[in-house]
Amino acid sequence: MRVLRLTEVQEKTGLARSTIYKYVDACIFPRPISLGGRSVGWIDSEIYEWLREKQVERDMTHGATRGWGL
């Protein structure tokens, strides 16, 4: 299991810090785990699964094209 810090989650998802925490509060993004003190991190596999779900949603809505109509 790999733990990602906020900057890595931002890089993987393309989301801003405020959006990540807004989605966490809305229960539509994986919750971070406490690493002690004020440090938190996200489980890499949970972020991967969230991105995979977004891909499936896209494919169900727009068909399984390569994303750009190619």
Image: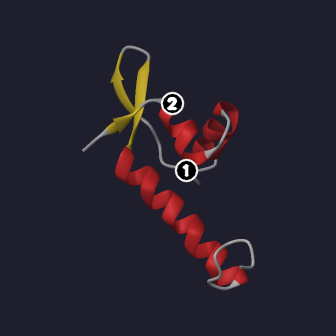
Q: Is residue 54 above or below residue 27?
A: below
> Which element type, helix, strand or loop, lies under badge 1?
loop
Q: Is residue 29 above or below residue 50?
A: above
Q: Residues within 10 Å of mark 2 (few under 14, many from 20)?
A: some
- Residue 59 drawn at (x, y percent): 63, 79
The quadrant holding residue 43 is top left
* Residue 50 image point, x, y percent: 50, 58
Q: Quadrant of the N terminus?
A: top left
Question: Callout 1, which amino acid?
Answer: Phe
> How far across and how far down the image is residue 49, in percent?
44, 60
Image position of 59 with respect to 6: above or below: below
As drawn, the label of residue 48 is: none
Q: Which residue is mark 2?
A: 6
Q: Which residue is mark 1?
A: 29
Residue at the image point whose x is 51% and y is 30% from the top: 6
Earlier in the chain: of badge 2 and badge 1, it is 2
Residue drawn 53% across the image and 67% down it: 53
Location of residue 64 (image quadrant): bottom right
Which amino acid type is shown beneath numbered disc 2? Answer: Leu
Disc 2, SS: helix
Q: Residue at x 44, y 16 (%)?
A: 38
